[in-house]
Amino acid sequence: MTPRRRPLDRQQIIDATLELADSQGLAAVSMRTIAGRLGVTPMALYRHVTDKRELLDGLVERLLLELPIPDRELPWEQRLRELAVGLRLIASRHPDVFLLLFARPAFTPAAVRPRDAVYDALRDAGIAEELVPRAERLLSTLVLGYAASEAGGRFSADESVRAGEEFEWAQELVFEQIRRLS
Amino acid sequence: MTPRRRPLDRQQIIDATLELADSQGLAAVSMRTIAGRLGVTPMALYRHVTDKRELLDGLVERLLLELPIPDRELPWEQRLRELAVGLRLIASRHPDVFLLLFARPAFTPAAVRPRDAVYDALRDAGIAEELVPRAERLLSTLVLGYAASEAGGRFSADESVRAGEEFEWAQELVFEQIRRLS
DNA sequence: ACCTGAACACCGTTCAAGT
DNA sequence: ACCTGAACACCGTTCAAGT
């Protein structure tokens, strides 16, 4: 047996798991198949992740880290649009894992950056400070809902073709109301 | 062994599965535990459901059948509010199974009744016929998103306390836009 | 420190057999 | 027609052992 160059680490395991989930589906993800991909026995994984559940948590965190945060100098509408586009792109790249977002709390470290970016945009839009968190939850729930519907297959194939355009229509309706609240 | 009174049927299996998912979580649902609850061997289930995936599909259908359809004589806003309340109630009763809604197509038989009810309400609100389907998808995605966030634990415990009120706030914003489109 | 072998208590599903 | 027994190819995870 050729010895492994780098010893195993958590990041490698998460990367391998994401690749597997994207190519074969979440159902194909097992500690044993992940280990197989890494050329290691299943038990070797347990030195780096506490168990499978915690590994899936790490996967979701990783997804959120892929989201680019727009430049603060841009107009607030554009920043919100770019965040939404980024999230929908993540959903299309990682459809199975994306659905796990609903089952994980939105206040993990990786979730803080996107949320703060939305807070900033809403403040720059001029809405009252006490409305900022609920407006953020409206926007994040809306984009997550559309992205999950599309990624999970709730919308028909025909609807999915237009889902981007349709989400943007819904988004503009909400922007309209945000301007009204300002 | 005492002989089973009624022979097993699909409905019994789905009921037992839903009970199990609600009380022990979706992770505890296995063909073997379901069979155990019904006093039968796992293999007996396969005469009535084709496999586990198809059984979970049946579970989601069953959830949608729980949704009461409001009286057509009521004002359109009230009908939409009642549908939303009903769906959020289903989510709170069956949090684990509810998340599966995003992964199942929205055009199954059981999904037709609630969607038609929303179509009717939107038409009565007076919005243009070609906007009806996308407005329905906006509303259903919004309510599904809020309900799933709450049921799945995306919102913090503190947020969940207010989630009902907060969803209604978001819903009224959308109603405002629907009136504007009319 | 990092990985393995063997083992335990589970899975979904098929197939031939029983009544 | 409806259910079972035995079997197959899997799971997650623990623990003692190897290097």
Image (cartoon, coloured by chain):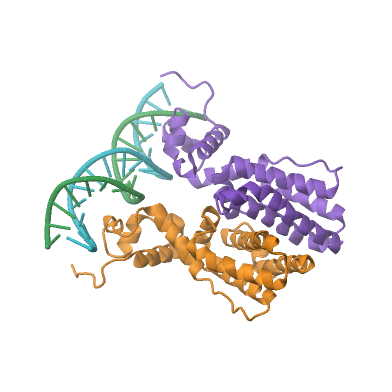
Chain colours: A orange, B purple, C cyan, D green
User: Image quarter for residue A86?
Assistant: bottom right
User: Image quarter for residue C16?
Assistant: top left
Residue B124 visible in the current orientation: yes
* B95 sits left or right of D10 in the view: right
Residue B113 visible in the current orientation: no
Q: Position of residue C9 (x, y in %)?
A: 31, 38
Residue found at the very far bottom of the displayed protein: A73
Residue that appears at 49% across and 42% down: B25
Q: Position of residue B157 (x, y in %)?
A: 57, 48
* B36 sits left or right of A49 in the view: right
Residue that appears at 59% across and 79% down: A71
User: Image quarter for residue B92?
Assistant: top right
The quadrant of the rendering that contains the C terminus of chain A is: bottom right
Q: Position of residue A74 (x, y in %)?
A: 65, 80
The quadrant of the rendering that contains the N terminus of chain A is: bottom left
Q: Position of residue B30 (x, y in %)?
A: 44, 41
Depicted B172 relative to depicted C9: above or below:
below
Total labels: the figure holds 0
Residue found at the very far top of the displayed protein: B2
Q: Which residue occupies the foreground of this view, A124 or A47?
A: A124
Q: Which residue occupies the foreground of this view, B128 or A65?
A: A65
Q: Which residue occupies the foreground of this view, A80 or A181?
A: A181
Residue that appears at 71% across and 44% down: B85
